[in-house]
Amino acid sequence: MKTIILNQRKERDELLSRPYLMRRNNQDSNTLLDSQLIKLITGPRRVGKSTHALLMLRNKNFAYLNFDNQALLEAWDANLVMRMLDDVYPDYDYLLLDEVQNLDGWDLWVSELYRLGKNLVITGSNAKMLSSEMATVLTGKYLQVEMLPFSLEEFFDWNQLDLHELRAEQKTDASVLMDDYMRNGGYPEVVASRQITRSYLDTLFDSIVWKDVAKRHHVRNITDLNDLAMYLLSNFCNPLSANELAEELGLASVNTVKKYMVYLHEPYLFYYLPRYNNKLKLMKKASRKVYVVDNGFVAAKAFSLSDNLGRLLENQIFVELIRRGYDTDKTMFYYRSRNDKEVDFVLRKGSRIERLVQVCFDMSSSKTEKREVNSLIECAEELKCNNLVIVTNKEERTIEKNGYKIAVIPVSKF
């Protein structure tokens, strides 16, 4: 066990020696570390959770355990581990537990460490940590930091441009970068080497489906699970119901589809956006729109992008709203009017609808503008909201119609 922990210390020190981009985050690291509450860093695989945790703890005296390590899991002995940590990291102030959800019964062990007064930073790639497991054992004992792939701003930071203060000579480069980001996404591993984007994300997608879903949940019919994942990916931004999916894919059980959809959300691969309705029962019955955590997965699985630019931009805006803290259970929805007009995002604050956001890649056609504006206004009238936005690829102007003022803004300013 001591050898495993010593090897992990070498791994930790090597990781700390590398240069990194500091991620934009609303939470101050020192304030977080000063709290005795557990610092929980969650998000999809390979988005930089471990790196963020290491950067938070850089220049601090901290111990490190990486649970993405079969040797550690097979030799697991909690008491022995704690003795060896004291040996390898004398008088450490913080304990970083990386990908801790791989340890059976991790939540009870973490709760015990918390009671012993350990100042914990933990990372995990599974949303279930926040639902059943964290909520049951660790209610009120943790602060959450959610990590996602690079935002557009961070992608520009990486390329040494300020998205919001572009000089005239940088506009062409910025336009190329925005298109690149929309098509290929923001996974940290590939922003530095775009030539590996497709192969890397193709492998990562399969790894999430097979390792984080099939293996974790002991799924026997992996072909059905994979077919569902591929169907969801090819239909991103479309409303789908479990009944429709079961029929389309020839699956015998609607309950199995529902179960697999939950499984595919747990590792932050897919999100499901409900249709807004004041009546909860009706809202639960309606089809949900499917989104994927990063546009790069669409490119990686080799679908034609020629007709998908509008959906790619919509998916990008959805992930940005998640990044800003909107929640698909409480504060973000889509909406269809009585005449079947649709608005992409209904954003709610408390019981009040604060904003309607429509996404349209190119609104230069008068026919397209009429369709998008009429849909937005009809939904605004029914929802009694006058804060209206249409996000486009590049256009910026104001449209006034029927007493409503609509801000048309490019994605770079959104």
Image: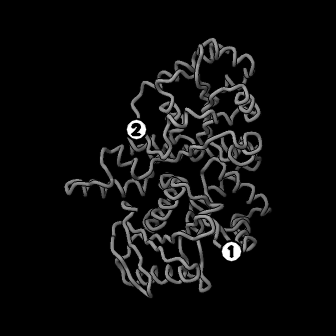
Q: Which amino acid type is shown beneath numbered disc 2?
A: Leu
Q: Position of residue 69 (x, y in %)?
A: 63, 27
Q: Of the numbered discs in the image, which one, if any, rests on residue 278?
A: 1
Q: Which mark is residue 21?
A: 2
Q: Label for residue 353?
A: none
Q: Is residue 55 left or right of residue 412?
A: right
Q: Is residue 106 above or below residue 410?
A: above
* Residue 118 placement: quadrant: top right
Q: Residues within 10 Å of mark 1 (few under 14, many from 20)?
A: few
Q: Amino acid at mark 1?
A: Asn
Q: Nearer the viewer, mark 2 or mark 1?
A: 1
- Image quadrant occupied by the N terminus: top right
| Total residue callouts | 2
Compare marks 2 and 1 and give the one earlier in the sequence: 2
Vertical comparison of 325 with 142: above or below: below
Give the Cα distance between marks 2 and 1: 43 Å
Q: Quadrant of residue 157?
A: top left
Q: Is residue 86 left or right of residue 371?
A: right
Question: Helix, strand or loop at disc 1?
Answer: loop
Q: Residue at x 30, y 58 (%)?
A: 175
